[in-house]
Amino acid sequence: MTAGKRWMSVLWSAFLVAAVLEMMVFAVVDPANLHWLGGEAIELSPRAVYTLAFFLFWAVSAVGAALALLLVRPADEINRDGQLDLPSG
């Protein structure tokens, strides 16, 4: 699998997960009633909250998918056929 296909599989699967998370979270949470940890109301439009939340969900999902893809790579591919480049000295 080429690097481009790997990245597209990571980003596409993360996109789908982010879309599902967005629907699940905002089916329960009203963006107009959100507050910061200090208690102040978030002064963003609901559309801005939806957008920021989606990109946050997408980024977190992409990191998880990329880590999973990294963990399933064979050792030979990671270690370049078992040859380690050690500094001489």
Image: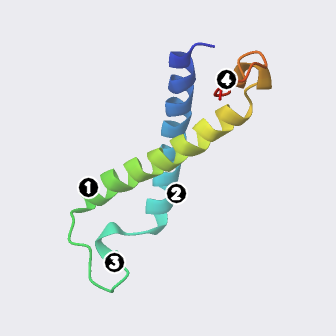
From the image, tell me which residue sits under label 1. 47
CA neighbours of label 3 inside 10 A, class few (<14), some (14 to 19), many (20+): few
Q: Circle 4 sits in a helix, a strand or a loop, which is it?
A: loop
The structure residue drawn at horizontal position 65% and vertical position 25%, both measured from the top left corner, is 88
Callout 4–callout 2 Cβ contact below 8 Å: no
Find residue 33 and report its horizontal and vertical position in percent.
33, 76
User: Height in image: 23 above or below 74?
Assistant: below
Position of the N terminus, as image quadrant, is top right
User: Height in image: 37 above or below 82?
Assistant: below
CA neighbours of label 4 inside 10 A, class few (<14), some (14 to 19), many (20+): few
The structure residue drawn at horizontal position 46% and vertical position 51%, both measured from the top left corner, is 57
Q: Residue furthest front?
A: 89
The colour scheme used to paint the residues is rainbow
Distance in Å between CA atoms under marks 4 and 1 = 50 Å
Position of the C terminus, as image quadrant, is top right
Labels 4 and 2: the sequence-earlier one = 2
From the image, tell me which residue sits under label 2. 24
Labels 4 and 1: the sequence-earlier one = 1
Find residue 46 and report its horizontal and vertical position in percent.
26, 61
Distance in Å between CA atoms under marks 4 and 2 = 47 Å
From the image, tell me which residue sits under label 3. 36
Quadrant assignment, res 32:
bottom left
Name the amino acid type tagged 4: Asp
Labels 4 and 3: the sequence-earlier one = 3
Name the amino acid type tagged 2: Met
Q: Circle 1 sits in a helix, a strand or a loop, which is it?
A: helix
Q: Circle 2 sits in a helix, a strand or a loop, which is it?
A: helix
In front: label 4 or label 2: 4
Callout 3–callout 2 Cβ contact below 8 Å: no
Name the amino acid type tagged 1: Arg
Callout 4–callout 1 Cβ contact below 8 Å: no
From the image, tell me which residue sits under label 4. 85
